[in-house]
Image (cartoon, rainbow, N blue to C red):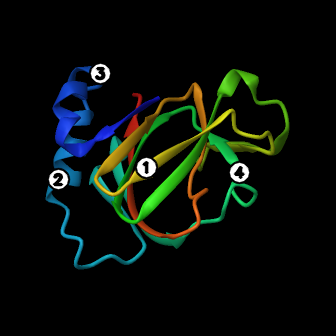
Amino acid sequence: MIVDQLSNSHRYLSIHQGFAEAFEFLRNFNSDNFEYRRLPVNGTALMAIIEESGGRGHGGSRLEAHRNYIDIQFAVTGRDEIGWSPHSECRSVTQPYSQEQDVEFYSDTPSLWIPVPAGTFAIFFPEDAHAPLSGSELIRKIIMKVSLN
């Protein structure tokens, strides 16, 4: 897991070949049209999910984990709060892994809560279970789905 401001994204480009294009998309996104949608940025190798949602609070969000994609969750406005736990420590499966959606869900309590204010991103790798939208306010965010393949 990595948490930083978008202005520092250049430090992480060498981690994955898709990060340069993902961060470029985030820097150039026109936030005037902020309706929920999924956008293919580079086929299935890089996708963007645009969403606006109220926070669910700590008790209303579930830990999720992915196997084929890295999430870069970027707060455009508002303040997200994301729960985190090592995926290896998650035991209580509430929704088994779906290959089609590349997600599984758990009812385990996150080990820690991470504030992600506007202008900040959090990167979650397959070993990072995460519970997004755990804050209490309206948030506009972009989730970049970066394929591991």
Residue at 22 percent across and 20 percent down: it is: 14
Q: Which residue is mark 4?
A: 62
Q: Are marks 2 and 1 in contact (CB under 8 Å)?
A: no
Q: Amino acid at mark 3?
A: Ile
Q: Which residue is mark 3?
A: 15
Q: Are marks 4 and 2 in contact (CB under 8 Å)?
A: no
Q: Amino acid at mark 1?
A: Val
Is residue 137 depicted above or below 63 in this figure?
below
Q: CA distance from mark 3 to mark 2?
A: 18 Å
Q: CA distance from mark 3 to mark 4?
A: 27 Å
Mark 2, Cα crowd under 10 Å, few <14 / some 14-19 / many 20+, is: few
Q: Nearer the viewer, mark 4 or mark 1?
A: 1
Camera-side residue of 127 and 138: 138
Q: Amino acid at mark 2?
A: Arg
Q: Secondary structure at mark 2?
A: helix
Is 71 on the left or on the right of 88, as rendered? left
Q: Nearer the viewer, mark 3 or mark 4?
A: 4
Which quadrant of the figure contains the C terminus? Answer: top left
Q: Earlier in the sequence, mark 4 or mark 2?
A: 2
Q: Which mark is residue 101?
A: none
Q: Which mark is residue 27?
A: 2
Q: Earlier in the sequence, mark 1 or mark 3?
A: 3
Q: Which residue is mark 1?
A: 116
Residue at 51 percent across and 71 percent down: it is: 53
Q: Secondary structure at mark 4?
A: loop
Camera-side residue of 123 and 43: 123
Q: Are marks 3 and 2 in contact (CB under 8 Å)?
A: no
